[in-house]
Image: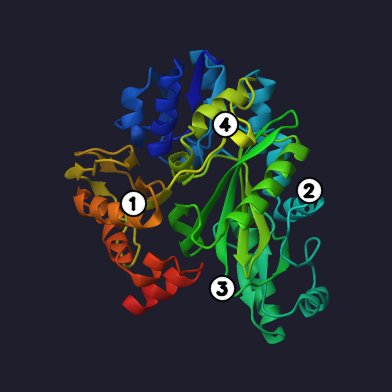
Amino acid sequence: MFQKILIANRGEIALRVLRACKELGIQTVVVHSTADADAMHVRLADESVCIGPPPSRDSYLNIHQIVAACEITGADAVHPGYGFLSENAKFADILAAHNITFIGPSGDHIRIMGDKIEAKRTAKRLGIPVVPGSDGAVTDQKEARRIAAEIGYPVIIKASAGGGGRGMKVALTEADLEIALHTASTEAGAAFGDDAVYIEKYLEKPRHIEVQVFGDGAGRGVHFGERDCSLQRRHQKVWEEAPSPALNAEERARIGNICAKAIADLGYSGAGTIEFLYENGEFYFIEMNTRLQVEHPVTEAITGIDLVHEQIRVASGGGLSVRQEDIKFNGHAIECRINAEDPRTFTPSPGTITHFHTPGGLGIRVDSGVYSGYKIPPYYDSLIGKLIVHGRNRVECMMRLRRALDEFVVDGIKTTLPLFRDLVGNADIANGDYDIHWLEKYLAKEE
C-alpha cells in the first residue's frame, strides 16, 4: 500500500479522495492554487503545496509543478480525481518516468479512449455495441454524404478529440450536412487543437446509460452496475441515478457482463465508465471515461463498495477486492449536482457563502468542500456539492430526496437547488419517463 498520496485536484473530489486516504491510513498531500488557500481539503490534508496562481493552466494543469510537489513531499502516488489531468496520458507517462504511481489506467489506455474514433474501433473489437457511423475521421463532403446516406438521417457530427458538447452538430437532412460538418470541424479545432470529426446515426429520444467498470490490469474485470445520466443540459449531466428506471434485470446483466469482459480483455487497470445511448432496447457505445466519475457516489450507495478505496487498492498492486458474484445491488440512489449558478439562466454565481446547512438523516450523503464564509472563486467549475440520496426503492428515494432538498440551505449566492425542487415534483421525473432532451425542453417551457 502507498505511504503518501498527492491529490492533484480541488473542491469536493479532493476532499472525497482525502477522506478515503485517511480511512486507509495513508498520508495525504494536496496541491492548490492561491485562490484555494482556504479550501476545506487544504485545511484537512497532512501537507499542502501551493502550485501557482488561480488560472488552471498555471496551477492544476501545471504538470511540472505537480511532479515537483511529489518530489518535495515524497509522495509515491498521485490521485487525479476527475477533470484537470485525470485523463491526460502525458501526465501518467511522466509520473511513471519519475517512479510515481498514477492512480488510474496506463497512458496507452487513456490515449486509446481519449480519441473518440479509436475508442469506437476498440469498443467494436471488444464486442461492445456501437452506434452505426463512420469507421474513422470524415474529411470531405462527398464522403460525408455517402456515409450519412448509408446510415440514414438524422446524423450527428462529433469531434474526435472532443467532449462536453463542443464540436458536435446535428444534420437532420442532406441540406444540413455541409454546414454541420464545417461548423463541427471548426469548433473542434478551436476547442481541442484537433479538427478531426466523425459521423454517427443520431438517436432521437435516447437515454444516457453508463456502466461502472473496474479492471485489475491482469485480465480480471468487473462491473458495478449502471447509472442513468439522461437529465442533461448542453450535454452536461445534472441528475444521475442508479439503477436506471429504463432497464430491466436482463438488460442490466447483459450490458454489464459485456463491459466487464471487455475491460478484462483490454487488460485495463482501475476505474472506468463505459457510456452508451440506449433506445428501443439497444445499447450504443459513445465513449469511455478512464477515471472516476462525478456521479460515482450513487454506485457506492447501491453496492456498499467504496470506489476510491478500490482505485487505491488496484493501483498499489492489491488487485480487485471483489469478484462479480460478490457485488450485490441494494435499493435506489439519486445524485443532484448543486452548482453555483442561477437556476434558470445557469449563469455562474461566484461569491461568499453566508450560510451553509446540509440535510441529514438516513440515506443522505452530501459531498462538498464548502462551508459558511467560504468564497466561491470565479475561476473553476461551478460545482459546489453533490446531494446523494439512497432508499430501499425509487419511490422511497424520491420522497427522501424531496425532504433533503427542503432542508438544504445555501445563502449568499445563487444555486441550482430551486431547479431540483421543481424536478422532484414533476410527474415525468417521478415516473422515470425522460430522455437526454427532456430537461432542455422543460427549461425552454419555463422561460
From this viewpoint, is residue 447 visible? no
Q: Which residue is mark 3?
A: 205
Q: CA distance from mark 3 to mark 1?
A: 26 Å
- What mark, if any, has residue 63 been given in the picture? 4
Q: Position of residue 394 (x, y in %)?
A: 39, 56
The quadrant in which residue 319 appears is top right
- What mark, if any, has residue 126 been given in the picture? 2
Few, some or many residues within 10 Å of mark 1 (<14, 14–19, 20+)? many
Give the mark nearer the N terminus: 3 vs 2: 2
In the displayed structure, does residue 437 sit left or right of residue 144?
A: left
The quadrant in which residue 95 appears is top right
Determine whether label 1 and label 4 are within 8 Å by CB: no
Helix, strand or loop under label 4: helix
Give the mark nearer the N terminus: 3 vs 4: 4
Give the mark nearer the N terminus: 1 vs 4: 4
Under mark 4, the amino acid is Ile
Q: CA distance from mark 2 to mark 1?
A: 36 Å
Under mark 3, the amino acid is Lys
Q: CA distance from mark 2 to mark 4?
A: 33 Å
